[in-house]
Amino acid sequence: MKTIKFLSILCFAFITMLSCEQDDFIEHEETLITANSTTTTNAVIIGNRNRLKQRPRRNYKSVIVVDDPTNSVTNAVVQYTPIDGENPFPEPFEMEVSSIRKSIRKMQKTQSMLNDDHLFPVGKPFQQTATLYNELGEPVGDQSETWVTAQDNDGTDVNHIESLYLSPSSVSIPIRLRTDQPEGITVFARVELYGRILIKGEPLEMEMTVYDETDGNIGLTGTAIAQLEELTGGSDIVPGDELQISVTTKDASGQTIDEDYFITPVTLSPNSNTIRNSASFVFGETMYVETRVTAETGSNIDKLTTVIIPLEGQDFEPFELELFPVSENENTIKFRSVGYENPTFVSAVGATQNVIHQITITDTDGNITEGTVQSAVTLLEGITHNPKHIIKPNGTTRIRMRLKNPIAQDVAYATMMIPSGIVEGEVDIITLEAISTTDGDIHRIDGDFVYDYISNNPDGTDYTTQVTTYNSANEPIGIEDVTFTIEDRQAPYEFTQTVITKNSTGVIRIKGQVEAKPASGAPINSSGPINNRIVIPEGNLDGTALEMTLALQPDANNPDLYNFDGIYGDVNTDVFNTQYETEVTLLNELDEILGSTNVVFDVEEEEIIEITQASLTQNNDEESFTFSIEIPESSTEFIEQVNVFLTPQDGGSDADPEDFTLEYVDNTFDGKLYLNNFVTFADPDSVIDMLYSAEVTVGISDGNGGYIPLLLIYALTGEE
């Protein structure tokens, strides 16, 4: 296929008003070098933020910023080499650390040129070579090289410029400017390749708009797009190429303020505000692409395409795939291509190489966002993983395997056969159906079957068999040998007195007993209680599964009995009718499964917690009252706070107090007492013999630092 070549110059010109103070020279700024050891760490210059700045009286200033986690760098030696002509800075010079902030060390130096002032190379690039040293004079890391452009002190400067790869003929050029004369300014950009083929592009004017204007600080931004069909002379741009970019700024009268030349390497840079990551997968001769974008962006995408582009040395033609949404969470939306057979790509790339993904996103309004990432190619050697052969508590056998994405989306079903010697009688070929998640993304295959096993204790038995996966057209996708380990979950435990109590506010209380059968021994050891886990599909109000983990506590009167009791809020109580059957899994202290069994719970609709006694009694001072309630011992372990509001039933606002909180005081014979000794009323005499409705809100801990509110109503009369 023929690639349409264009060069997209995306220029973000951030222009800020500067004052013209005498000492406000602009420096060669913030070359970032990383140094992690004194012998092996590479020194890396980051960001193309370098400026070599002229000062008055033939001076110039350099600044270098070093990221030095080992705190070993003390100085640097810097050398400038011009792109052509005489070098006004022929001698290397030393810079010392001038400030330190955590691991960041800043070096700067101001010095005079050795030649006349008119030789200052305004707008010309220099190659800057920097070597870091420690206090012993030993080099720290490798010598680093980058390009820096000399700029004068006329108040208008380019302080940031990059070349970001988009496609073999498309490069984005972000630019930031600052100026002390923004009114009427115009900006032109022209691009050519440096060092390989020097073919110039046409200069383009950017339309500048104000994006910030506060207290005389004016910022402008602009965008230009250049079509440069002949830029590369027939060969593609690749990351690592260097571009020479001339940036010309003119004032309102059309006079040139500056014309600066920059040399920048072409680097990869995705749109980090939109594209999170992109990946390539290969199975056989079929390849897939997955791309994750931010949820905000993904919800508004009309079309997402990715062009797969070779890196140097890879012999395949670029090709384009369209991706479709398959799943999402609160942060990202995953897009995936259909399988694409491309044996040339597979043989050219292999399993451990990288390729380029040029991603184009079109939203529902027609706006286009582009980004480019380097994607690792992952070779998938099989389709299934995590095989399970489980004998369920009711004796049914469940066979399940998870499927590897992205192949999973193509799987409709699979077939297999259990080998002889595992189950009795002849075994037919069985079919496992593909199961999808709630958002439609296929993730496993499974099926339920009934077998009689040859062994009385098949738990832990291994066997290997062939599994064949098929697509919806009944075409085989792959055949692989899979090893299963039988897991027998027919647990030797019996559940009794199992009850779910629900109320109208979405709160349930679930409790019961577990009895160890004589052959099994106790389900816990002396180091402490175990848990049981109960999962109710669609049990939460939002439709998600309610997962409850309840501690098993030894019964005081029977060492083989273990009690569980728990309260949960925000529950979809509509799933519970007169009885509810579900699977309960027993766990030890290490959260390891001891077994599971199906349990039937009786469902009751009544108060989750009850008040056995309440009173409102006048104190000896005849001005205040004591309000107290008693709650059964079996319920108080869940209570974190108790709030009360009294409403007089016989009228009279003077007898109506503010709401108040009760504090736990003491145990009673069969419960716990909560009270408040200082309940006051505007007219204390009106409280005596007044009939009240007490709205008692009991705060139940939800285990996460919050509370589940339970509203209880109790009628009582004020007493002397």
Image (spheres, rainbow, N blue to C red):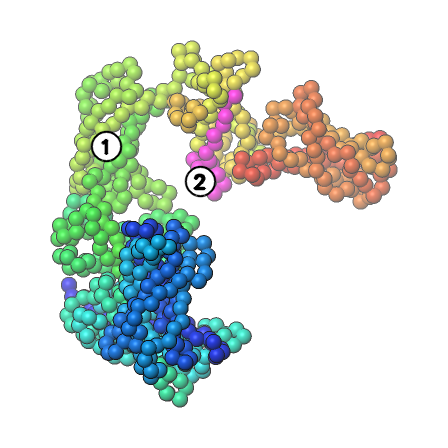
* Between 324 and 394, the one nearer to me in the picture: 324
Q: Magenta stretch: residue 28 in it?
A: no
* Residue farthest along the front direction in this orientation: 136
- Which image quarter: residue 668? top right
- Near-viewer residue (115 or 158): 115
From where the camera sits, is residue 367 visible? no
Tell me residue 302's x, y (percent): 33, 60
Tell me the element at label 1: strand
Using the rendered view, name the quadrant where residue 98 is placed.
bottom left
* Residue at the farthest top position: 518
Q: Residue at x 22, y 35 (%)?
A: 414
Given this view, does label 1 or label 2 mark the residue nearer the observer?
2
Q: Which mark is residue 431?
A: 1
Magenta residues, start to end = 536-553
The reply to whether dot 1 and dot 2 touch (C-beta < 8 Å) is no
Q: Residue at x 55, y 31 (%)?
A: 567
Mark 1 vs mark 2, CA separation in Å: 29 Å
